[in-house]
Amino acid sequence: MDTSKKTMKTSKILLLAALPAAIMAANVQAAPEVYGKLNVSLQQETQDAGASNTQDNWKLESNASRVGVKGSADLGNTGLKGVYKLEYGTDVANGDGGTGWTSRNSYLGVQGSWGTVIGGKFDTPTKEAQGKVDLFNDYQWADITNVISGENRASQIIMYSAPKMGGVVMNVAVIPGQSSSTVAGGGEGPADGVSASAVYDTDNLYLAAAIDSDVSDNVALALPTGNAGTEKNSLRLVGQFKATSAIALGAILQRS
């Protein structure tokens, strides 16, 4: 038997188990935060499939209802924290007749004075760059997911977020291409897809710039601007100014 291969396999297993074990052992009294959002609307829809085939329907819709748990724990005296989040979506309107429990933003990571690294399934920096400009976020047909590309929640994604410097936060995420439907054309490298953003956020002003490189959309647009998987590179600029506590002006400019 090749003992070197056996030792390497054992080392990989121990390495993968080390972080969650350290989080649990470091601070067993750290209570996780349980959160959720139930959003149900009664809406009237007009489906126009031609002059002789127009339907008006009333529908009860669950708009990205979800439940999750998140938290952090000190990793001994290392100055590091383990961070985690598990979030699942549910169809409140249809129950088991809907899509059932679906995986949303979920990750495991490490945080220190140098920044934060997380890995799992979560929104890309380009999607997050929209901020609060999308006033109809999560609603079935009004969400900007149906209008512009780049609204991706990627699997097998690893992201580094730098500490805030001069009010700006930098985020860089890489997506290995192997077995990932979010990377155009697949691939075998550790960074076949890249998404990055720079975000400046104050009480009254929000500015963001983001790019996607070789990251294909995992949702089809409602408008005839392309189907899922067709957009591979994009540049997004976002700005929002809060004039008063009740009035804010925002815009998204994007080229894909």
Image (cartoon, rainbow, N blue to C red):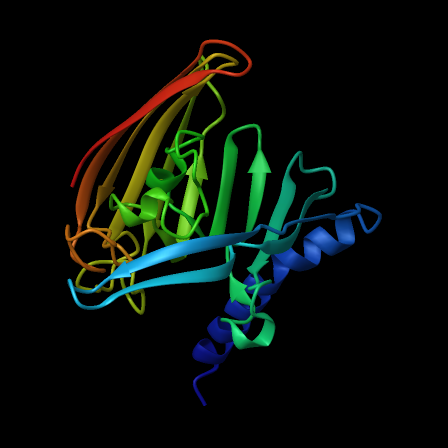
The residue lying at 62 percent from left, 45 percent from top is 83
Instruction: Single out the residue that lies furthest toward the right.
Output: 29
Question: Residue 224 appears at what percent x and percent y?
Answer: 15, 53
Left or right: 153, with 147 as reference point: right
Instruction: Single out the residue that lies furthest toward the bottom.
Output: 1
Res 55 quadrant in image: bottom left
Left or right: 127, with 242 as reference point: left
Res 226 quadrant in image: bottom left
The residue lying at 62 percent from left, 52 percent from top is 38
The residue lying at 32 percent from left, 53 percent from top is 175
Front one among 224 and 205: 224
Residue 120 shows in this picture: no
Res 142 quadrant in image: top left
- Pick the quarter of the image with the C terminus: top left
Front one among 208 and 112: 208
Question: Residue 181 appears at what percent x and percent y?
Answer: 29, 65
Question: Residue 62 appears at what percent x and percent y?
Answer: 53, 57
Residue 184 shows in this picture: yes
Question: Residue 128 appears at what percent x and percent y?
Answer: 41, 38
Front one among 101 and 95: 95
- Pick the quarter of the image with the N terminus: bottom left
